[in-house]
Amino acid sequence: MVSIAEPIAKPASPFRFLLDRREVLNAVLISPAILYVFLLVGLPFLLAIYYSVSAYTLYDPTWRFVGIQNFLDVLKNPVFLRTLGNTFLFTFASNFLGLVMGKFGAFLLLQPFRGRRIVRALVILPWAVPIALATIAWEWIFDSLYSVINWTLIALGIVTRADAPNWLGSPGLAMLCIIIINAWRFFPFAIVIFLAGITAVPQDVIDAATVDGAGFWRRNYQIIVPMILPIVAIGLIFGIVFTFTDLSIVFLLTNGGPAGATSVLGFEGFQVGIASGDVAHGAAISLFMLPVLLVVVIGMLRFIRRREI
Amino acid sequence: MQRIIAFATRRTLFWLAIAFFVFVCAFPFYWMVITSFKENSDLYNVANVPFWFTEPPTLEHFRYLFEQTLFGRWLLNSAIIGVCVTTITLLAAVPGGYSLARMTGRSGEALGIGVFLTYLVPPSLLFLPLSRIVANLGLQNSMWSLVLVYPTFTIPFCTWLMMGFFKAMPIEIEEAAIVDGCSLFGAFVRMTIPLSLPAILTVVIFTFTLTLQEFVYALTFVSSSAQKPVTLGVVTDLIRGDVFYWGELMAGALIASVPVGIAYNLFLDRFISGITGGAVK
Protein backbone atom coordinates (compact mmCIF):
# COMPACT_ATOMS: atom_id res chain seq x y z
CA MET A 1 0.00 0.00 0.00
CA VAL A 2 1.31 3.41 -0.87
CA SER A 3 -1.47 5.38 0.66
CA ILE A 4 0.71 6.30 3.65
CA ALA A 5 2.58 8.82 1.58
CA GLU A 6 -0.47 10.21 -0.06
CA PRO A 7 -1.33 13.75 1.07
CA ILE A 8 -4.80 14.21 2.41
CA ALA A 9 -6.68 16.37 -0.02
CA LYS A 10 -8.04 19.39 1.80
CA PRO A 11 -11.67 19.99 1.04
CA ALA A 12 -11.57 23.29 -0.81
CA SER A 13 -14.24 25.43 0.73
CA PRO A 14 -15.89 27.87 -1.66
CA PHE A 15 -15.63 30.55 1.04
CA ARG A 16 -11.85 30.43 0.91
CA PHE A 17 -11.82 31.62 -2.68
CA LEU A 18 -14.24 34.36 -1.86
CA LEU A 19 -12.20 35.52 1.13
CA ASP A 20 -9.11 35.70 -1.06
CA ARG A 21 -10.62 38.53 -3.03
CA ARG A 22 -9.76 41.88 -1.51
CA GLU A 23 -13.19 43.48 -2.02
CA VAL A 24 -15.03 40.54 -0.50
CA LEU A 25 -12.71 40.32 2.48
CA ASN A 26 -13.01 44.06 3.11
CA ALA A 27 -16.80 43.86 3.00
CA VAL A 28 -16.87 40.89 5.37
CA LEU A 29 -14.48 42.48 7.86
CA ILE A 30 -16.28 45.81 8.03
CA SER A 31 -19.77 44.29 8.30
CA PRO A 32 -19.90 43.65 12.09
CA ALA A 33 -19.04 47.29 12.82
CA ILE A 34 -21.50 48.61 10.23
CA LEU A 35 -24.24 46.28 11.46
CA TYR A 36 -23.81 47.23 15.11
CA VAL A 37 -23.76 50.92 14.34
CA PHE A 38 -26.73 50.63 12.00
CA LEU A 39 -28.86 48.78 14.55
CA LEU A 40 -27.98 50.86 17.61
CA VAL A 41 -27.20 54.29 16.17
CA GLY A 42 -29.01 54.46 12.83
CA LEU A 43 -32.31 52.95 13.91
CA PRO A 44 -32.55 54.85 17.22
CA PHE A 45 -31.79 58.03 15.33
CA LEU A 46 -34.73 57.39 12.98
CA LEU A 47 -36.81 56.47 16.01
CA ALA A 48 -35.91 59.81 17.65
CA ILE A 49 -37.14 61.61 14.55
CA TYR A 50 -40.34 59.58 14.63
CA TYR A 51 -40.94 60.28 18.32
CA SER A 52 -40.54 63.98 17.67
CA VAL A 53 -43.50 63.99 15.26
CA SER A 54 -45.70 61.70 17.35
CA ALA A 55 -47.64 62.03 20.61
CA TYR A 56 -45.62 59.31 22.38
CA THR A 57 -45.29 59.51 26.17
CA LEU A 58 -44.25 56.91 28.71
CA TYR A 59 -47.78 56.72 30.05
CA ASP A 60 -49.50 56.70 26.69
CA PRO A 61 -47.21 54.93 24.19
CA THR A 62 -49.15 55.81 21.09
CA TRP A 63 -47.77 56.22 17.59
CA ARG A 64 -50.25 58.91 16.62
CA PHE A 65 -48.71 61.27 14.10
CA VAL A 66 -48.95 64.95 15.07
CA GLY A 67 -46.67 66.54 12.48
CA ILE A 68 -44.55 69.46 13.66
CA GLN A 69 -46.87 70.20 16.57
CA ASN A 70 -44.23 69.17 19.15
CA PHE A 71 -41.68 71.53 17.66
CA LEU A 72 -44.20 74.38 17.69
CA ASP A 73 -45.05 73.64 21.36
CA VAL A 74 -41.39 73.68 22.26
CA LEU A 75 -40.72 76.93 20.41
CA LYS A 76 -43.64 78.64 22.15
CA ASN A 77 -42.13 77.90 25.53
CA PRO A 78 -40.02 80.86 26.76
CA VAL A 79 -37.96 78.48 28.92
CA PHE A 80 -36.84 76.70 25.78
CA LEU A 81 -35.64 79.87 24.08
CA ARG A 82 -33.59 80.68 27.14
CA THR A 83 -32.20 77.13 27.10
CA LEU A 84 -31.19 77.55 23.48
CA GLY A 85 -29.41 80.81 24.27
CA ASN A 86 -27.67 79.23 27.26
CA THR A 87 -26.46 76.33 25.11
CA PHE A 88 -24.85 78.67 22.58
CA LEU A 89 -23.26 80.80 25.27
CA PHE A 90 -22.00 77.72 27.15
CA THR A 91 -20.57 76.13 23.99
CA PHE A 92 -18.83 79.10 22.47
CA ALA A 93 -17.54 80.69 25.65
CA SER A 94 -16.05 77.47 27.01
CA ASN A 95 -14.56 76.39 23.68
CA PHE A 96 -13.06 79.79 23.09
CA LEU A 97 -11.59 79.88 26.58
CA GLY A 98 -10.36 76.30 26.21
CA LEU A 99 -8.74 77.02 22.87
CA VAL A 100 -6.92 80.12 24.09
CA MET A 101 -5.65 78.32 27.20
CA GLY A 102 -4.76 75.33 25.05
CA LYS A 103 -2.65 77.39 22.67
CA PHE A 104 -0.89 79.08 25.55
CA GLY A 105 -0.33 75.79 27.38
CA ALA A 106 1.00 74.10 24.25
CA PHE A 107 3.43 76.97 23.77
CA LEU A 108 4.70 76.47 27.33
CA LEU A 109 4.97 72.69 27.00
CA LEU A 110 6.95 73.00 23.77
CA GLN A 111 9.88 74.52 25.67
CA PRO A 112 12.33 71.99 27.00
CA PHE A 113 12.52 72.17 30.78
CA ARG A 114 13.10 69.85 33.69
CA GLY A 115 10.07 67.93 34.85
CA ARG A 116 8.18 68.48 31.60
CA ARG A 117 6.78 64.94 31.60
CA ILE A 118 5.36 65.33 35.09
CA VAL A 119 3.86 68.70 34.22
CA ARG A 120 2.27 67.20 31.12
CA ALA A 121 0.92 64.27 33.12
CA LEU A 122 -0.76 66.63 35.59
CA VAL A 123 -2.06 68.97 32.91
CA ILE A 124 -3.75 66.13 31.03
CA LEU A 125 -5.76 65.01 34.09
CA PRO A 126 -8.87 67.18 33.62
CA TRP A 127 -9.49 65.64 30.24
CA ALA A 128 -8.72 62.06 31.27
CA VAL A 129 -10.70 61.77 34.48
CA PRO A 130 -14.45 61.01 34.13
CA ILE A 131 -16.17 64.38 33.94
CA ALA A 132 -18.94 63.33 36.34
CA LEU A 133 -16.36 62.73 39.09
CA ALA A 134 -14.45 65.93 38.37
CA THR A 135 -17.71 67.88 38.39
CA ILE A 136 -18.47 66.58 41.88
CA ALA A 137 -15.07 67.83 43.04
CA TRP A 138 -15.88 71.23 41.55
CA GLU A 139 -19.26 71.23 43.25
CA TRP A 140 -17.42 70.84 46.55
CA ILE A 141 -15.03 73.64 45.60
CA PHE A 142 -18.00 75.91 44.78
CA ASP A 143 -19.98 74.81 47.86
CA SER A 144 -22.20 77.56 49.29
CA LEU A 145 -20.82 77.25 52.81
CA TYR A 146 -17.46 75.46 52.67
CA SER A 147 -16.18 76.79 49.34
CA VAL A 148 -12.39 76.88 49.45
CA ILE A 149 -12.45 79.83 47.03
CA ASN A 150 -14.60 81.83 49.41
CA TRP A 151 -12.45 80.79 52.35
CA THR A 152 -9.40 82.16 50.55
CA LEU A 153 -11.17 85.37 49.54
CA ILE A 154 -12.27 85.91 53.13
CA ALA A 155 -8.83 85.11 54.53
CA LEU A 156 -7.32 87.64 52.12
CA GLY A 157 -9.86 90.20 53.30
CA ILE A 158 -11.36 90.69 49.84
CA VAL A 159 -14.90 89.81 50.91
CA THR A 160 -16.59 89.19 54.23
CA ARG A 161 -18.46 86.01 55.09
CA ALA A 162 -21.75 87.87 54.88
CA ASP A 163 -21.36 88.92 51.25
CA ALA A 164 -19.27 86.00 49.99
CA PRO A 165 -20.41 84.96 46.49
CA ASN A 166 -22.87 82.07 46.27
CA TRP A 167 -21.29 80.47 43.21
CA LEU A 168 -23.98 78.02 42.19
CA GLY A 169 -26.87 80.01 43.65
CA SER A 170 -26.85 83.15 41.53
CA PRO A 171 -27.67 82.96 37.80
CA GLY A 172 -24.65 84.77 36.35
CA LEU A 173 -22.09 83.04 38.56
CA ALA A 174 -23.61 79.60 37.99
CA MET A 175 -23.27 80.09 34.23
CA LEU A 176 -19.69 81.23 34.73
CA CYS A 177 -19.02 78.09 36.80
CA ILE A 178 -20.23 75.63 34.18
CA ILE A 179 -18.30 77.51 31.48
CA ILE A 180 -15.12 77.40 33.55
CA ILE A 181 -15.50 73.69 34.31
CA ASN A 182 -16.08 72.81 30.70
CA ALA A 183 -13.16 74.94 29.53
CA TRP A 184 -11.06 73.29 32.23
CA ARG A 185 -12.05 69.87 30.93
CA PHE A 186 -11.50 70.78 27.26
CA PHE A 187 -8.25 72.72 27.29
CA PRO A 188 -5.86 69.79 27.98
CA PHE A 189 -7.30 68.16 24.88
CA ALA A 190 -6.65 71.41 23.00
CA ILE A 191 -3.06 71.41 24.30
CA VAL A 192 -2.55 67.87 23.07
CA ILE A 193 -4.01 68.71 19.66
CA PHE A 194 -1.87 71.84 19.33
CA LEU A 195 1.26 69.93 20.38
CA ALA A 196 0.58 67.18 17.85
CA GLY A 197 0.10 69.80 15.16
CA ILE A 198 3.10 71.96 16.01
CA THR A 199 5.54 69.07 16.24
CA ALA A 200 4.36 68.00 12.78
CA VAL A 201 5.41 71.35 11.26
CA PRO A 202 8.76 70.73 9.51
CA GLN A 203 11.60 72.56 11.26
CA ASP A 204 13.07 73.79 7.95
CA VAL A 205 9.92 75.78 7.22
CA ILE A 206 10.33 77.59 10.54
CA ASP A 207 14.06 78.04 9.95
CA ALA A 208 13.42 79.46 6.49
CA ALA A 209 10.95 81.94 7.94
CA THR A 210 13.45 82.94 10.62
CA VAL A 211 16.16 83.50 8.00
CA ASP A 212 13.72 85.61 6.01
CA GLY A 213 13.35 87.85 9.05
CA ALA A 214 10.09 86.63 10.58
CA GLY A 215 9.97 87.40 14.28
CA PHE A 216 8.34 85.37 17.04
CA TRP A 217 4.74 86.55 16.51
CA ARG A 218 4.98 86.34 12.75
CA ARG A 219 6.34 82.80 12.87
CA ASN A 220 3.59 81.91 15.25
CA TYR A 221 0.56 83.41 13.60
CA GLN A 222 1.50 83.49 9.92
CA ILE A 223 3.39 80.20 9.61
CA ILE A 224 2.58 77.76 12.39
CA VAL A 225 -1.08 78.51 13.04
CA PRO A 226 -2.15 78.32 9.38
CA MET A 227 -0.22 75.07 8.97
CA ILE A 228 -1.85 73.35 11.93
CA LEU A 229 -5.38 74.61 11.22
CA PRO A 230 -6.71 71.30 9.83
CA ILE A 231 -5.72 69.42 12.95
CA VAL A 232 -7.09 72.19 15.19
CA ALA A 233 -10.33 72.01 13.23
CA ILE A 234 -10.67 68.32 14.10
CA GLY A 235 -10.13 69.13 17.76
CA LEU A 236 -12.67 71.91 17.56
CA ILE A 237 -15.28 69.60 16.01
CA PHE A 238 -14.96 67.36 19.04
CA GLY A 239 -15.02 70.30 21.43
CA ILE A 240 -18.09 71.99 19.97
CA VAL A 241 -20.10 68.83 19.38
CA PHE A 242 -19.50 67.42 22.84
CA THR A 243 -20.10 70.73 24.60
CA PHE A 244 -23.22 71.56 22.65
CA THR A 245 -24.78 68.23 23.56
CA ASP A 246 -23.40 67.88 27.07
CA LEU A 247 -25.70 67.38 29.99
CA SER A 248 -23.61 65.81 32.74
CA ILE A 249 -21.97 69.01 34.03
CA VAL A 250 -25.26 70.87 34.25
CA PHE A 251 -27.15 67.87 35.62
CA LEU A 252 -24.69 67.35 38.46
CA LEU A 253 -23.64 70.89 39.27
CA THR A 254 -26.70 73.10 39.01
CA ASN A 255 -29.58 70.89 37.86
CA GLY A 256 -30.37 73.62 35.35
CA GLY A 257 -30.83 76.18 38.10
CA PRO A 258 -31.04 78.64 39.60
CA ALA A 259 -34.42 79.15 37.90
CA GLY A 260 -33.32 77.73 34.55
CA ALA A 261 -30.31 80.01 34.26
CA THR A 262 -27.95 77.17 33.30
CA SER A 263 -30.37 74.85 31.53
CA VAL A 264 -28.93 73.57 28.25
CA LEU A 265 -30.48 71.55 25.40
CA GLY A 266 -29.22 68.13 26.45
CA PHE A 267 -30.35 68.68 30.01
CA GLU A 268 -33.78 69.98 28.97
CA GLY A 269 -34.26 66.96 26.67
CA PHE A 270 -33.44 64.68 29.59
CA GLN A 271 -35.77 66.48 31.97
CA VAL A 272 -38.73 66.43 29.59
CA GLY A 273 -38.12 63.09 27.92
CA ILE A 274 -36.92 60.91 30.80
CA ALA A 275 -37.73 62.62 34.09
CA SER A 276 -41.23 63.73 33.01
CA GLY A 277 -41.74 60.86 30.57
CA ASP A 278 -42.88 63.10 27.71
CA VAL A 279 -40.80 61.28 25.11
CA ALA A 280 -42.23 63.13 22.12
CA HIS A 281 -41.40 66.63 23.34
CA GLY A 282 -38.06 65.46 24.74
CA ALA A 283 -37.11 64.10 21.34
CA ALA A 284 -38.19 67.34 19.69
CA ILE A 285 -35.97 69.35 22.08
CA SER A 286 -32.98 67.08 21.47
CA LEU A 287 -33.45 67.31 17.72
CA PHE A 288 -32.91 71.06 17.88
CA MET A 289 -29.23 70.16 18.29
CA LEU A 290 -29.09 68.52 14.91
CA PRO A 291 -28.96 71.54 12.57
CA VAL A 292 -26.16 73.10 14.61
CA LEU A 293 -24.17 69.87 14.68
CA LEU A 294 -24.61 69.41 10.94
CA VAL A 295 -23.47 72.94 10.18
CA VAL A 296 -20.39 72.60 12.41
CA VAL A 297 -19.34 69.18 11.13
CA ILE A 298 -19.95 69.84 7.43
CA GLY A 299 -18.30 73.26 7.63
CA MET A 300 -15.21 71.87 9.34
CA LEU A 301 -14.89 68.85 7.05
CA ARG A 302 -15.13 71.05 3.95
CA PHE A 303 -12.56 73.36 5.43
CA ILE A 304 -10.15 70.49 6.15
CA ARG A 305 -10.60 68.99 2.73
CA ARG A 306 -10.07 72.30 0.95
CA ARG A 307 -6.79 72.80 2.76
CA GLU A 308 -5.52 69.32 2.02
CA ILE A 309 -5.78 69.71 -1.75
CA MET B 1 23.63 93.28 33.51
CA GLN B 2 20.44 94.32 31.79
CA ARG B 3 20.46 91.08 29.81
CA ILE B 4 20.79 89.05 32.97
CA ILE B 5 17.79 90.82 34.47
CA ALA B 6 15.79 90.30 31.28
CA PHE B 7 16.73 86.62 31.27
CA ALA B 8 15.83 86.19 34.93
CA THR B 9 12.47 87.91 34.40
CA ARG B 10 11.72 85.68 31.45
CA ARG B 11 12.55 82.53 33.42
CA THR B 12 10.48 83.65 36.38
CA LEU B 13 7.48 84.44 34.18
CA PHE B 14 7.85 81.10 32.45
CA TRP B 15 7.86 79.14 35.71
CA LEU B 16 4.99 81.21 37.05
CA ALA B 17 2.95 80.31 33.97
CA ILE B 18 3.82 76.62 34.37
CA ALA B 19 2.88 76.78 38.04
CA PHE B 20 -0.42 78.43 37.14
CA PHE B 21 -1.31 75.67 34.67
CA VAL B 22 -0.36 72.88 37.04
CA PHE B 23 -2.34 74.51 39.84
CA VAL B 24 -5.46 74.96 37.72
CA CYS B 25 -5.36 71.38 36.44
CA ALA B 26 -4.36 69.53 39.56
CA PHE B 27 -6.11 71.49 42.30
CA PRO B 28 -9.48 69.68 42.11
CA PHE B 29 -7.62 66.38 42.47
CA TYR B 30 -5.55 67.65 45.36
CA TRP B 31 -8.85 68.71 46.84
CA MET B 32 -10.25 65.18 46.45
CA VAL B 33 -7.24 63.77 48.31
CA ILE B 34 -7.37 66.29 51.16
CA THR B 35 -11.14 65.99 51.61
CA SER B 36 -11.21 62.22 51.54
CA PHE B 37 -8.65 61.91 54.37
CA LYS B 38 -10.11 64.58 56.66
CA GLU B 39 -12.21 64.08 59.77
CA ASN B 40 -15.74 65.44 59.36
CA SER B 41 -15.23 67.79 62.31
CA ASP B 42 -12.19 69.19 60.50
CA LEU B 43 -13.97 69.34 57.14
CA TYR B 44 -16.99 71.28 58.32
CA ASN B 45 -15.27 73.90 60.42
CA VAL B 46 -14.78 77.16 58.56
CA ALA B 47 -12.33 78.38 61.18
CA ASN B 48 -9.77 75.76 60.10
CA VAL B 49 -7.36 76.36 57.26
CA PRO B 50 -8.86 74.09 54.58
CA PHE B 51 -5.66 73.44 52.62
CA TRP B 52 -4.10 71.11 55.16
CA PHE B 53 -5.07 68.86 58.08
CA THR B 54 -5.94 70.57 61.36
CA GLU B 55 -6.86 67.25 62.95
CA PRO B 56 -4.91 64.12 62.05
CA PRO B 57 -5.91 62.41 58.77
CA THR B 58 -8.35 59.51 58.91
CA LEU B 59 -9.36 56.52 56.80
CA GLU B 60 -12.93 56.74 58.08
CA HIS B 61 -14.42 57.82 54.72
CA PHE B 62 -12.78 54.97 52.86
CA ARG B 63 -13.98 52.48 55.47
CA TYR B 64 -17.52 53.82 55.24
CA LEU B 65 -17.34 53.68 51.44
CA PHE B 66 -16.41 50.01 51.33
CA GLU B 67 -18.44 48.81 54.31
CA GLN B 68 -21.61 50.88 54.29
CA THR B 69 -22.14 51.52 50.59
CA LEU B 70 -22.19 49.40 47.45
CA PHE B 71 -18.91 50.93 46.27
CA GLY B 72 -17.17 47.56 45.87
CA ARG B 73 -20.10 46.30 43.85
CA TRP B 74 -19.93 49.41 41.60
CA LEU B 75 -16.24 48.81 40.95
CA LEU B 76 -17.03 45.20 40.04
CA ASN B 77 -19.89 46.30 37.76
CA SER B 78 -17.60 48.75 35.99
CA ALA B 79 -14.98 46.04 35.52
CA ILE B 80 -17.54 43.60 34.07
CA ILE B 81 -18.99 46.26 31.77
CA GLY B 82 -15.48 47.29 30.69
CA VAL B 83 -14.39 43.73 29.86
CA CYS B 84 -17.56 42.90 27.91
CA VAL B 85 -17.62 46.17 25.97
CA THR B 86 -13.93 45.85 25.16
CA THR B 87 -14.44 42.33 23.79
CA ILE B 88 -17.35 43.40 21.58
CA THR B 89 -15.43 46.46 20.43
CA LEU B 90 -12.31 44.50 19.50
CA LEU B 91 -14.32 41.95 17.53
CA ALA B 92 -15.86 44.71 15.44
CA ALA B 93 -13.21 47.44 15.37
CA VAL B 94 -10.03 45.51 14.56
CA PRO B 95 -11.36 43.91 11.35
CA GLY B 96 -13.32 47.07 10.58
CA GLY B 97 -10.33 49.36 10.90
CA TYR B 98 -8.21 47.00 8.80
CA SER B 99 -10.84 46.89 6.12
CA LEU B 100 -11.14 50.71 6.03
CA ALA B 101 -7.37 51.14 5.88
CA ARG B 102 -7.03 48.75 2.93
CA MET B 103 -10.04 50.02 1.00
CA THR B 104 -9.03 52.08 -1.97
CA GLY B 105 -10.85 54.81 -3.77
CA ARG B 106 -13.77 56.99 -2.88
CA SER B 107 -15.97 54.42 -1.17
CA GLY B 108 -13.31 53.65 1.44
CA GLU B 109 -12.78 57.32 2.17
CA ALA B 110 -16.53 57.94 2.44
CA LEU B 111 -16.97 54.98 4.81
CA GLY B 112 -14.08 56.24 6.95
CA ILE B 113 -15.69 59.67 7.30
CA GLY B 114 -19.01 57.95 7.97
CA VAL B 115 -17.49 56.05 10.88
CA PHE B 116 -15.99 59.25 12.24
CA LEU B 117 -19.38 60.97 12.02
CA THR B 118 -21.21 58.22 13.91
CA TYR B 119 -18.83 58.81 16.77
CA LEU B 120 -20.07 62.41 16.77
CA VAL B 121 -23.74 61.44 17.10
CA PRO B 122 -24.18 62.46 20.73
CA PRO B 123 -25.74 60.37 23.52
CA SER B 124 -28.10 63.21 24.30
CA LEU B 125 -29.74 62.68 20.90
CA LEU B 126 -29.97 58.90 21.23
CA PHE B 127 -30.79 58.23 24.87
CA LEU B 128 -34.55 58.66 24.42
CA PRO B 129 -35.05 56.07 21.66
CA LEU B 130 -32.38 53.81 23.15
CA SER B 131 -34.12 53.85 26.52
CA ARG B 132 -37.27 52.56 24.82
CA ILE B 133 -35.29 49.89 22.95
CA VAL B 134 -33.56 48.85 26.16
CA ALA B 135 -36.93 48.65 27.94
CA ASN B 136 -38.41 46.51 25.17
CA LEU B 137 -35.47 44.13 25.38
CA GLY B 138 -36.13 43.74 29.11
CA LEU B 139 -32.75 45.23 30.01
CA GLN B 140 -34.08 48.24 31.84
CA ASN B 141 -32.36 48.85 35.15
CA SER B 142 -29.63 46.35 34.37
CA MET B 143 -25.96 46.95 33.67
CA TRP B 144 -26.24 44.68 30.61
CA SER B 145 -28.08 47.51 28.90
CA LEU B 146 -24.80 49.44 29.11
CA VAL B 147 -22.87 46.48 27.68
CA LEU B 148 -25.27 46.61 24.74
CA VAL B 149 -25.20 50.38 24.23
CA TYR B 150 -21.59 51.41 24.98
CA PRO B 151 -20.21 49.80 21.81
CA THR B 152 -22.24 52.35 19.83
CA PHE B 153 -19.55 54.91 20.59
CA THR B 154 -16.55 52.67 21.28
CA ILE B 155 -16.82 50.83 17.95
CA PRO B 156 -16.72 53.95 15.73
CA PHE B 157 -13.98 55.50 17.84
CA CYS B 158 -11.80 52.40 17.92
CA THR B 159 -12.42 51.56 14.26
CA TRP B 160 -11.12 55.03 13.47
CA LEU B 161 -8.09 54.52 15.74
CA MET B 162 -7.31 51.10 14.26
CA MET B 163 -7.65 52.52 10.75
CA GLY B 164 -5.00 55.08 11.60
CA PHE B 165 -2.66 52.38 12.91
CA PHE B 166 -3.22 50.00 9.99
CA LYS B 167 -2.67 52.78 7.46
CA ALA B 168 0.77 53.35 8.98
CA MET B 169 1.62 49.66 8.56
CA PRO B 170 3.23 48.82 5.19
CA ILE B 171 1.08 46.61 3.00
CA GLU B 172 4.27 44.88 1.76
CA ILE B 173 4.32 42.78 4.94
CA GLU B 174 1.04 41.17 3.98
CA GLU B 175 2.09 40.79 0.36
CA ALA B 176 5.22 38.96 1.47
CA ALA B 177 3.09 36.59 3.55
CA ILE B 178 0.81 35.96 0.58
CA VAL B 179 3.79 35.20 -1.66
CA ASP B 180 4.90 32.71 0.98
CA GLY B 181 1.60 30.90 0.71
CA CYS B 182 -0.77 32.62 3.06
CA SER B 183 -4.27 33.41 1.96
CA LEU B 184 -5.35 37.03 2.11
CA PHE B 185 -7.36 36.38 5.26
CA GLY B 186 -4.50 34.30 6.67
CA ALA B 187 -2.11 37.19 6.12
CA PHE B 188 -4.43 39.44 8.12
CA VAL B 189 -4.78 36.96 10.97
CA ARG B 190 -1.19 35.71 11.13
CA MET B 191 0.83 38.78 10.16
CA THR B 192 -1.15 41.99 10.58
CA ILE B 193 -2.86 41.27 13.88
CA PRO B 194 0.27 40.07 15.76
CA LEU B 195 2.18 43.08 14.44
CA SER B 196 -0.51 45.47 15.60
CA LEU B 197 -0.69 44.21 19.19
CA PRO B 198 0.57 47.53 20.63
CA ALA B 199 -2.20 49.31 18.74
CA ILE B 200 -4.76 46.79 19.96
CA LEU B 201 -3.58 47.30 23.52
CA THR B 202 -4.10 51.04 23.08
CA VAL B 203 -7.63 50.38 21.87
CA VAL B 204 -8.29 48.13 24.86
CA ILE B 205 -7.13 50.81 27.30
CA PHE B 206 -9.13 53.56 25.64
CA THR B 207 -12.30 51.49 25.35
CA PHE B 208 -12.03 50.78 29.04
CA THR B 209 -11.55 54.44 29.95
CA LEU B 210 -14.40 55.49 27.64
CA THR B 211 -16.76 53.13 29.45
CA LEU B 212 -15.63 54.56 32.79
CA GLN B 213 -16.11 58.14 31.57
CA GLU B 214 -19.60 57.60 30.21
CA PHE B 215 -22.36 59.08 32.33
CA VAL B 216 -25.49 59.93 30.31
CA TYR B 217 -26.53 56.42 29.26
CA ALA B 218 -25.82 55.03 32.70
CA LEU B 219 -27.93 57.77 34.27
CA THR B 220 -30.78 57.11 31.86
CA PHE B 221 -30.90 53.31 31.89
CA VAL B 222 -29.82 52.24 35.37
CA SER B 223 -31.52 53.34 38.55
CA SER B 224 -31.15 50.45 41.00
CA SER B 225 -28.04 50.89 43.12
CA ALA B 226 -26.67 47.36 42.78
CA GLN B 227 -26.48 47.65 38.99
CA LYS B 228 -24.69 50.99 38.74
CA PRO B 229 -21.21 51.46 37.30
CA VAL B 230 -18.81 53.27 39.60
CA THR B 231 -19.00 56.71 37.95
CA LEU B 232 -22.78 56.80 38.32
CA GLY B 233 -22.88 55.18 41.74
CA VAL B 234 -20.50 57.66 43.32
CA VAL B 235 -22.24 60.79 42.08
CA THR B 236 -25.82 59.65 42.72
CA ASP B 237 -25.85 57.32 45.71
CA LEU B 238 -23.58 59.25 48.05
CA ILE B 239 -25.95 62.20 48.02
CA ARG B 240 -29.02 61.51 50.16
CA GLY B 241 -31.57 64.23 49.54
CA ASP B 242 -29.79 67.42 50.47
CA VAL B 243 -27.03 65.73 52.43
CA PHE B 244 -23.73 65.42 50.61
CA TYR B 245 -21.29 62.88 52.05
CA TRP B 246 -18.34 64.96 50.89
CA GLY B 247 -15.63 62.79 52.41
CA GLU B 248 -17.04 59.63 50.86
CA LEU B 249 -17.84 61.39 47.58
CA MET B 250 -14.26 62.58 47.21
CA ALA B 251 -12.83 59.22 48.29
CA GLY B 252 -14.95 57.41 45.71
CA ALA B 253 -14.15 59.92 42.98
CA LEU B 254 -10.47 59.61 43.80
CA ILE B 255 -10.38 55.81 43.62
CA ALA B 256 -12.28 55.79 40.34
CA SER B 257 -10.18 58.56 38.74
CA VAL B 258 -6.68 57.35 39.54
CA PRO B 259 -6.55 54.34 37.16
CA VAL B 260 -8.05 56.40 34.32
CA GLY B 261 -5.53 59.19 34.84
CA ILE B 262 -2.61 56.77 34.81
CA ALA B 263 -3.86 54.86 31.76
CA TYR B 264 -4.31 58.06 29.79
CA ASN B 265 -0.83 59.25 30.57
CA LEU B 266 0.81 55.98 29.62
CA PHE B 267 -0.98 55.66 26.29
CA LEU B 268 -1.46 59.26 25.28
CA ASP B 269 1.20 59.38 22.57
CA ARG B 270 -0.13 56.29 20.79
CA PHE B 271 -3.62 57.63 21.09
CA ILE B 272 -2.66 60.92 19.46
CA SER B 273 -0.86 59.23 16.60
CA GLY B 274 -3.92 57.05 16.04
CA ILE B 275 -6.50 59.79 16.10
CA THR B 276 -4.53 62.16 13.89
CA GLY B 277 -3.08 59.38 11.73
CA GLY B 278 -6.56 58.67 10.44
CA ALA B 279 -7.20 62.33 9.80
CA VAL B 280 -4.07 63.54 8.06
CA LYS B 281 -2.91 60.24 6.54
Image (tube, coloured by chain):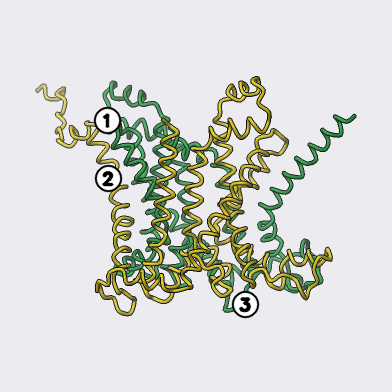
Q: Residue at x 68, y 43 (%)?
A: A119
Q: Position of residue A219 (x, y in %)?
A: 63, 30
Q: Is residue B205 left or right of residue A114?
A: left
Q: Which mark is nearer the camera, 3 or 1?
A: 3
Question: Rounded to the nearest whole Å, what is the CA distance between mark 2 and mark 1?
Answer: 17 Å
Q: Is residue A304 left or right of residue A1?
A: right
On whether disc 3 and disc 1 are found on a single subunit, the reply is: yes
Secondary structure at numbered mark 1 = helix
Q: Position of residue B37 (x, y in %)?
A: 70, 64
Q: Position of residue A105 (x, y in %)?
A: 65, 43
Q: Residue at x 69, y 33 (%)?
A: A112
Instruction: Determine the chain carrying the residue at label 1.
Output: B
Q: Quadrant of residue B33?
A: bottom right
Instruction: Determine the chain carrying the residue at label 3.
Output: B
Q: Quadrant of the N terminus of chain B?
A: top right
Q: Quadrant of residue B200?
A: top left
Residue B89 against residue B98 in the figure, above or below? below
Secondary structure at numbered mark 2 = helix
Residue A113 against residue B70 in the figure, above or below? above
Chain B: colour as depicted: green
Question: Rounded to the nearest whole Å, what is the CA distance between mark 3 and mark 1?
Answer: 62 Å
Q: Position of residue B50 (x, y in %)?
A: 77, 65
Label 1 sits on residue: B184
Amino acid beneath label 2: Ser
Circle on res. B266: none
Q: Quadrant of the C terminus of chain B?
A: top left
Residue A210 against residue B12 in the figure, above or below? above
Label 2 sits on residue: A31
Label 3 sits on residue: B243
Chain identifier of the yellow chain: A
Residue B204 against residue B140 in the figure, above or below? above
- Report if residue A70 is visible in the image: yes
